């Protein structure tokens, strides 16, 4: 889907091997009160890998990726991101969050700031980047998501698809090693879904490590290295897209696929 | 009238009869209401007219205008009030001009069209105040007050021209505005007893200036801002030792002058305290949370009048022996404690109205909790509660009339001076009351109008 004339932006780290484990979840359990949202989750994600998580609503997909950057606290098991184990230590948590970008279903842009300020806020406040450098970085990212002309507008003046692309640029501005996508196209009008997915495809082609919770099966088929199917808080089945969509093994997977395809 | 213009199609063009039928006698019930209300309104209007222009003994007001404005303030020091008025006119003009310039910068940056404020708009917002001042001037019946008012208008206009300043001078222009306000205060209060005020302000300004320095490491910031604020305080204190300008402390202020300053000072002090209380009430630390909650619920359960009394009688026991706070200072403390509790609840409402996704987005970007609060949550939360906060300030302004119970002659209790005069001992009680009521209303209404504008201006770019 990417253009042949423009060289794709590279998100890889030359010093590290493709496939080196960057996210590691071991026997992770998560409860909301008495309800168990995650049951014994074990998962490894390697550098430059694109993992797509699918499953019925309420199956724990969002909770899973929200545990990876500690927006939710897991109750048992270990989560290690780039060698750092998530614990109650706020400093560890902040380091992990700086390395993992997250894009939300509802965009969560800051409505009182311009697009430019939305993107530069974190680099300036967290990475202490000077204004000039932060502005240059923001413009570069806005060009990458193809809306440089909107830089001075407020989020409320943009369409949903444009807002979501700004949200992606805002995450990229922290130069994360991993990107987490939480149903980022679910709140969009159909005609705007493609422009957001295109940006995500380019990210994947540039070598970004991604975990994507989505209902877009076309995206899963085309981009994913692995598809993870979750149901009732458990990982039911994992496989390559071809395997997953053509010959699923588990009954629950077959039922889910028959309902949505 | 504009609404009737929109309905024009159903009515004959320019027909008064049509308007009356449509508006007043649309059906039996509206007709009945009209038949009852119109005579009542005519009667009330007639009685008001008779009271204001025929029977009213307004000499009780017009011969006491100076009393209403400055109460028991020493008359040989009136020049200070005039000088204060001039400085404040300049300061308000400069503040409005600089604010307008800042708004224009922001709009231009966002590629929006900036609509500059118009004279008509300003008149619409402040007509109640302008009308009140005109009534005062007409009643005064001499040229002096007209000259003072005219000079204030001219100075306000001069200050307003600060909107023309280039962007690079905007910060300087804000600083100049603040200094003018301070000078306005101290031209009356003098520098001797009130040195703590500029020191406190300098400290606040230094901290505010230093904290946003982004290259500083988080640990260094408190140190640097502490050093900066101490240095600023030392400089101001030194300057005030050299100037040593004697003045009239606020324990001698009175009348409308005191009412306005008391409300402004208490509002300015209560806002930061209320903000901190609101944050404490939402804190993760149970001790802080319970303390803030207890404080807020205790204060909100007690009438202001009780707190004012307690300020007079109990504050003395809690302060070190020998501290001699004036009644006004005690009442400012009591008013601040009271208003802060209410503001805290208002701000808490604003904090809770924000969708959790806003703070989560900040967290996901690795921001520190204080950064999220300062840059994401508070700007949005405070904007959302401007109307409620201004409502609280208006309420405080009117509550300043309770100061009479601790023997402070504020605006309302100037009536006591007036009706102690032999000429007005038994007559004109209604006239002075109406005058005072109109005075309060003129200011309160202007505040309310200004808050509506502020809300609109800060809402720039939002849906």
Image (tube, rainbow, N blue to C red):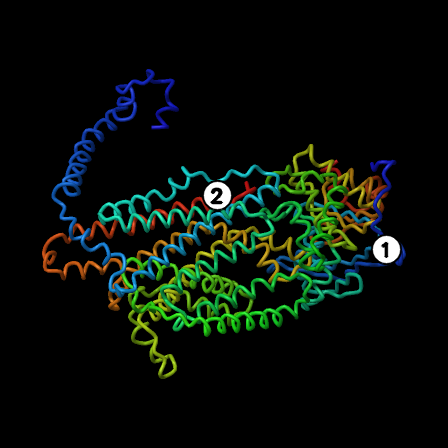
* Picture residue at 56% right of the left edge, 72% below the top: B231
User: Is residue B43 shown left or right of residue A133?
Assistant: left
> What chain does badge 1 belong to?
A
User: Is residue A239 shown left or right of residue B65?
Assistant: right
* Residue A26 drawn at (x, y percent): 77, 62
Relative to B75, residue B98 above or below: above
Identify the element where label 1 is drawn. loop
Q: Could you classify mark 2 by the number of other residues whose Cα lies within 10 Å: few (under 14), some (14-19), or many (20 or more)?
A: few
* Residue B279 drawn at (x, y percent): 51, 63
- Would you say the residues marked 2 and 1 are in contact, meaning their CB atoms lie under 8 Å apart? no
User: Is residue A153 shown left or right of residue B289?
Assistant: right
Q: Quadrant of the N terminus of chain B?
A: top left
Residue placed most toward the observer, A19 or A64: A19
Residue placed most toward the observer, B10 or B96: B96
* Residue B358 drawn at (x, y percent): 60, 52
Same chain for labels 2 and 1? Say yes or no: no
- Asked if one can make out residue A252 in the rendered structure from this viewpoint, the answer is no
User: Is residue A167 shown left or right of residue B295?
Assistant: right
Relative to B341, residue A8 above or below: above
Q: Residue A217 carries which label?
A: none
Residue labelled with disc 2: B456
Residue placed most toward the observer, B451 or B385: B451
Q: How many labels does the image show?
A: 2
* Picture residue at 65% right of the left edge, 35% below the top: A189
Mark 2 and mark 1: span between their CA atoms? 47 Å
* Picture residue at 44% right of the left edge, 62% below the top: B182
Identify the element where label 2 is drawn. helix
* Residue B239 drawn at (x, y percent): 49, 71
Residue labelled with disc 1: A13
Q: Quadrant of residue B318?
A: bottom left
Residue placed most toward the observer, B389 or A246: B389
């Amino acid at each position: 889907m990417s253009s042949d004339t423009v060289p794709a932006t590279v998100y890889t780290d030359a010093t590290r091997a493709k496939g080196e484990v960057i996210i590691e979840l071991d026997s992770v359990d998560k409860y909301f009160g008495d309800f168990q949202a995650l049951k014994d989750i074990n998962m490894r994600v390697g550098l430059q890998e694109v993992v797509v998580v699918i499953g019925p609503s309420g199956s724990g997909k969002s909770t899973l990726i929200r545990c990876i950057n500690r927006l939710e606290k897991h109750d048992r098991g270990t989560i290690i991101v780039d060698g750092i184990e998530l614990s109650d230590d706020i400093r560890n948590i902040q380091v992990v969050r700086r390395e993992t970008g997250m894009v939300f279903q509802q965009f969560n842009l800051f409505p009182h700031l311009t697009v430019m300020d939305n993107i530069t806020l974190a680099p300036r406040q967290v990475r202490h980047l000077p204004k000039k450098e932060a502005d240059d970085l923001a413009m570069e990212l806005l060009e990458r998501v193809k809306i440089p002309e909107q830089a001075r507008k407020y989020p409320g003046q943009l369409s949903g698809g444009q807002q979501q692309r700004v949200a992606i640029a805002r995450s990229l501005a922290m130069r994360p090693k991993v990107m987490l996508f939480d149903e980022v196209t679910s709140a969009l009008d159909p005609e705007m879904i493609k422009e957001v997915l295109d940006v995500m495809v380019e990210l994947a082609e540039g070598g970004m490590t991604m975990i994507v919770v989505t209902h877009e099966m076309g995206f899963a088929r085309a981009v994913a290295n692995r598809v993870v199917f979750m149901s009732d808080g458990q990982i039911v089945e994992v496989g390559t897209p071809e395997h997953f969509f053509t010959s699923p093994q588990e009954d629950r997977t077959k039922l889910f696929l028959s309902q949505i395809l | 009238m504009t609404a009737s213009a929109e309905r024009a199609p159903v009515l004959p063009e320019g027909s008064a009869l049509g308007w009356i039928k449509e508006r007043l006698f649309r059906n039996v019930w509206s007709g009945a209401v009209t038949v009852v209300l119109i005579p009542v309104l005519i009667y009330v209007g007639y009685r008001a007219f008779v009271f204001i222009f025929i029977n009213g003994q307004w000499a009780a007001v017009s011969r006491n205008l100076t009393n209403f404005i400055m109460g028991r303030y020493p008359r040989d020091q009136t020049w200070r009030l005039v000088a204060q008025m001039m400085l404040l006119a300049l300061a308000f003009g400069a503040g409005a001009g600089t604010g307008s310039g800042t708004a224009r910068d922001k709009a231009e940056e966002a590629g929006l069209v900036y609509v500059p404020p118009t004279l008509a708009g300003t008149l619409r917002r402040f007509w109640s105040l302008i009308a009140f001042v005109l009534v005062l001037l007409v009643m005064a019946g001499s040229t002096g007050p007209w000259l003072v008012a005219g000079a204030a208008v001219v100075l306000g206009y001069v200050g307003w021209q600060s909107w023309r300043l280039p962007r690079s001078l905007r910060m300087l222009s804000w600083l100049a505005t603040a200094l003018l306000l301070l000078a306005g205060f101290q031209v009356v209060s003098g520098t001797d007893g009130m040195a703590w005020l500029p020191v406190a302000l300098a400290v606040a300004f230094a901290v505010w200036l230093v904290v946003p320095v982004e290259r500083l490491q988080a640990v260094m910031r408190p140190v640097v801002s502490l050093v900066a604020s101490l240095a600023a305080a030392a400089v101001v204190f030194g300057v005030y030792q050299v100037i040593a300008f004697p003045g009239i402390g606020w324990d001698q202020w009175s009348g409308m002058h005191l009412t306005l300053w008391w409300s402004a000072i208490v509002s300015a002090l209560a806002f930061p305290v209320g903000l901190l209380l609101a944050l404490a009430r939402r804190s993760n630390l149970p001790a802080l949370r319970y303390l803030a909650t207890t404080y807020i619920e205790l204060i909100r359960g007690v009438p202001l009048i009780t707190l004012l009394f307690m300020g007079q009688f109990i504050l003395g026991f809690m302060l070190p022996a020998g501290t001699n706070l004036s009644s006004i200072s005690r009442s400012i403390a009591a008013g601040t404690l009271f208003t802060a509790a209410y503001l805290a609840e208002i701000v808490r409402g604003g904090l809770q109205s924000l969708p959790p996704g806003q703070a989560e987005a900040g967290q996901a970007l690795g921001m520190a909790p204080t950064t999220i609060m300062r840059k994401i949550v508070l700007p949005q939360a405070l904007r959302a509660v401007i109307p409620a906060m201004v409502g609280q300030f208006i309420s405080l302004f009117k509550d300043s009339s309770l100061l009479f119970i601790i023997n402070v002659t504020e605006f309302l209790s100037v009536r006591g001076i007036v009706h102690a005069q032999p000429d007005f001992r038994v007559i004109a009680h209604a006239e002075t009351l109406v005058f005072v009521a109109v005075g309060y209303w003129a200011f309160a209404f202007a505040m309310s109008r200004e808050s509506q504008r502020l809300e609109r201006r800060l809402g720039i770019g939002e849906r």
